[in-house]
Image (tube, rainbow, N blue to C red):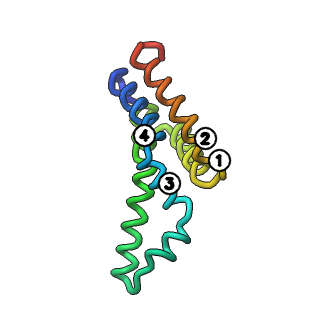
Amino acid sequence: MASASPLLGGALLIAAGVYQWLPLKGRCLTHCRSPIGFFAAEWREGPAGALAMGVRHGLHCVGCCWLLMALLFVAGVMNLLWIAAIAGFVLVEKLVPGGRIVGRVAGAALMGWGVLTLAGGL
C-alpha cells in the first residue's frame, strides 16, 4: 500500500521535510515534550475539564507529527518496518535533549529524498 506516484511521494517527502523546520512544529513539539508543564498550566477540574485538556494536548501532539505519519503513504501504510522507524524517530525527537536538531537534520534528508524522488532517482 505504498504510493505508486513519484509526484505525490516526492511532494509529501518535501512537505514533511519543510514542516520539520517550521516554527509551528517547534511550538507543538514543546508542548509534547513537557506534558507535566502542560497539565500544570492548563489544569481543568472534572470530566469535562479532563476531556478539554486531552483534546488540547492531543492537538499539539498531532500538530507535531501529522506529516511524519503521512509519510506512511510513501513508504507503505502496512509496512511494519516503516511504522517502527517513524515511531522511533518521533520518540527520539520528543525525548532526546537534542531532538530538535535531529528533527532538522531529518527534515533536510526528507527534502533531499523528495527531490530525488521527483527527479526519478528513487
Q: 32 or 1: nearer the eye?
A: 32
The residue labelled by disc 3 is 29
45 vs 28: above or below: below
Residue 44 screen position, x and y as percent: 40, 81
Q: Position of residue 41 (x, y in %)?
A: 47, 75
Question: Mark 2 or mark 3, which is nearer the start of the sequence?
Answer: 3
The label number, if any, that marks residue 24 in the structure image: none
Residue that carries the numbered disc 1 in the rendered image:
98
**Tag count in the figure?**
4
What is the C-alpha distance between the residues marked 3 and 1? 12 Å
- Where is mark 4, residue-wise? 19
Residue 65 visible, this angle? no
Instruction: Give, as a three-letter code, the residue at label 4.
Output: Tyr
Mark number, residue 102: 2
Callouts 3 and 2 close, C-beta under 8 Å: no
Q: Position of residue 68 (x, y in %)?
A: 45, 42
Q: Amino acid at mark 3?
A: Leu
Could you tell me which secondary element the residue under label 2 belongs to? helix
